[in-house]
Image: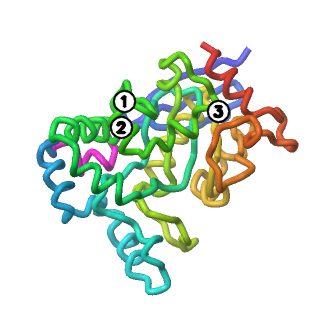
Amino acid sequence: MLVLKYFFKKDVMIIMNTNNNSTLYPEWEELKKNNPWAILFKNRSIEDIRHQICDWNTEFVHPDDMEVISAHNTDMKINDSNRFVLFKLPKPYRGNLKDPKLVILSLNPGFNERVNKTLFNMLTPEYQNQFIALSKKNLLLEEGCKIISNEVDDVLDNGYWTSKLSDLEIDDESNLSKIALIQFIPYASKNFGSWKEESCLKTQQFTKKIIHHLLHETTAIFLVMRSRDQWEKLIGDEMNEFKDRFMYNRNPRCQKLSRKNLWDENAVIKDQYQRIINAFKDS
């Protein structure tokens, strides 16, 4: 029998097993306290954020990311469609980041001017505030978040994840609370062309800590939809240590969670789609 011993040291909890191997990882509450996105959004009112979005003149960029993001956007080799749109709220993650059953690892949020700018400005302040409140709740890692929260959230996402998850036949809405989405880059763009290998956002280190928390403290399975090489570089040794917990989309151009798209002849469990269904059923 594996015996676990717990003791605390400063800001982390060490778990030691009988084989004398130890793993260091942040506790969930400690993780929330050190959330870099709270610096930007915790003390900003929803009304303040709404006016800034509607005016379209405020760049929502974390100060620690500014140098790398600015260098990317001013690179003469980068097309306009590949530059990051910084007037839209960043989305480093959404959904249940505490104890999900499925974690989707993607690349970055998309940007559709007709939806994300024109349609947003057409909404009443009440609906705009509702959307911002949901975004803020996700950014602050509050509990009760879903990958798709309500109709406004879905519309301003252009129905993207509603479409991508449709084959899962999630009749029980509680299953939406079992999914987490993590973006490699939290800033939106119309397309994603290139990203210099040496470029690294400082907020990505927090993303790494969240993933390590999920690997060590939950039984969640991971589905890498895009940018496998980049995720392997960011996550590090844990990706190999927990390789049985990772699945891969065979067609990175399509993020549809379908049996056809997720079938993998080289995987231990070839039917990765069914593995997700089973994970939702596992209490």
Numbered disc 2: secondary structure: helix
Neighbourhood count class around disc 2 (C-alpha, 10 Å): few under 14, some 14–19, many 20 upward: some
Q: Quadrant of the N terminus?
A: top right
Q: Is residue 167 found inside the magenta-colored segment of the image? A: no
Q: Amino acid at mark 1?
A: Asn
Which mark identifies residue 153?
2
Which residue is painted at 52% across and 31% down in the image?
179
Q: How many labels, in total?
A: 3
Q: Say if 158 sits above or below 272 in the image.
A: below
Q: Amino acid at mark 2?
A: Asp
Tag 1 near tag 2, CB within 8 Å: yes
Residue 146 x/y as whole percent: 43, 30
Which mark identifies residue 150?
1
Which residue is painted at 77% across and 39% down in the image?
260
* Disc nearer the start of the sequence (3/2): 2
Q: Is residue 38 found inside the magenta-colored segment of the image? A: yes
Residue 123 x/y as whole percent: 22, 43
- Tell me: 115 left or right of 258: left
- Tell me: 184 left or right of 41: right
